[in-house]
Amino acid sequence: MLVKSSLETIQKLDLLTRGAKYDVSCASSGVERKSSNGKIGNALVGGLCHSWSADGRCISLLKTLQTNYCQNNCAYCINRCKNDVRRVTIAPEELAKITYEFYRRNYIEGLFLSSGIYHSANRTMELMLDTVKVLRKRYGFNGYIHMKILPGADANAIEEAIFWADRVSINVELPTSSSMQLLAPQKDLKQIIHTMYRINAIREKLLLSPNKEGYYSRGGQSTQMIIGATPETDWQILRLSEYLYKKVKLKRVYYSAYVPLNQEPILPSLPQPPLRREHRLYQADWLLRFYHFSLDELLSENEPNLHDHFDPKIFWALRHLEFYPIELTRATLPQLLRVPGIGPISARRIIHARKAGMLDLDILKKLGVVLKRAIYFITIRGKYFADICLDHPSLPSYLEDTNSQNNHEVGDLFACEP
């Protein structure tokens, strides 16, 4: 049983977890760690989130704020200082104990810890670090911890967070300085990106001389961008993402469809969150990270937005039919990755399978190839299997994405390869 005072703790936790639910930058840890003597818990490479992991598990973590007090007045945030909401702070010992108890009862598999900024970024980071250190030291908690870095935190606080957490993140939220100045004037985009560089440098330094006790944020760092609250194009959003992947070695950018939480004239009035757009950005992001596409191949200043009815890979293929059909018995890995319906896993399986025997459509299905898309863009030993040719005017209608936008979720990315 939890201690008698836990009813108040649960009430606090209810407020703080509701305040944290719009931060999506916590879906996958990328960390694998076995249990060890004297400690409780482990971390699995499949990741932790409120959804399905890449290895098919349904997983969960305690996603909460340390406090919902905040000195900032970000127009899109439910916890902004201007809002009349009940404010609470949970003590480090309180939060560490309930995390430990929840883990023991198999309610959760880890902790995602964020916070509003109370008094100062460093003071709030101190509370968060105390929570994590009580968990790690007193309770011997060896499970997954994702810790938010607050804008304005100093180097010592960042270093401690990296040392104790499996992943750290600092949210960009908005992709341009002008939008940040409009909706989050207390934040500075250049300062946040500078902090990302600092996180990367500190993390690399710590990994060179690891202390046996440390966790070193081996899952890297991530960030979140809100989609639809400001007028930026998909090209502007993905240009920043591509920059962060290349220059800051960011592990992951998460895209969060704007949900209207506050009534402000500077905020857009949307009939519903732009979930289709969010989904398209995730698909394009996937192509940038795993399919060897560059942003210039997908978008430009003149054509700055992703297509509503075609996923980015199919839209690229339809504009570059001279690249197809691809002969699967000879195609290289980069060529296979350009085929709609073939992703990195199935591409490598095809290369391995063709060394062992003959390819056919049944084998491709077993290898995970989405033939509904791929069949128009491939040949096998010179034979073309689709019922219409590549230059047929009806081809786009066969490939159009007719799914309702409400069916697009981040987890869909793991269901099949683009």
Image (cartoon, rainbow, N blue to C red):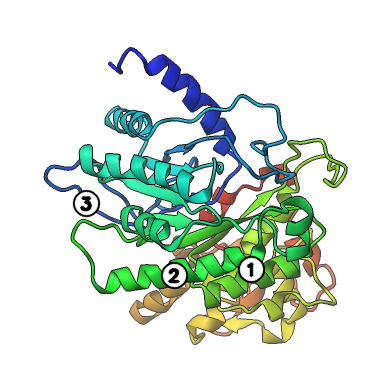
Find numbered disc 1 in the image and state the secondary structure of the residue it sits on: helix
Task: Give coordinates of residue 75: x percent, y percent.
Answer: 75, 44
Report whether 133 appears left or right of 245.
left
Find numbered disc 3 in the image and state the secondary structure of the residue it sits on: loop
Is residue 140 depicted above or below 189 in this figure?
above
Residue designated by label 3: 34
State the CA–CA distance, disc 1 to disc 3: 38 Å
Q: Earlier in the sequence, mark 2 or mark 1?
A: 1
Report whether 264 appears left or right of 187.
right
The answer to the question of whether label 2 and label 1 lie on touching residues, with beta carbons closer than 8 A, is: no
Residue at image coords 40%, 51%: 47
Q: Closer to the camera: disc 1 or disc 3?
A: 1
Residue designated by label 1: 190
Residue designated by label 2: 200
Residue 403 visible in the shown view: no
Amino acid at pointer 2? Asn
State the CA–CA distance, disc 2 to disc 1: 15 Å
Residue 285 visible in the shown view: yes
Residue at image coords 65%, 70%: 240
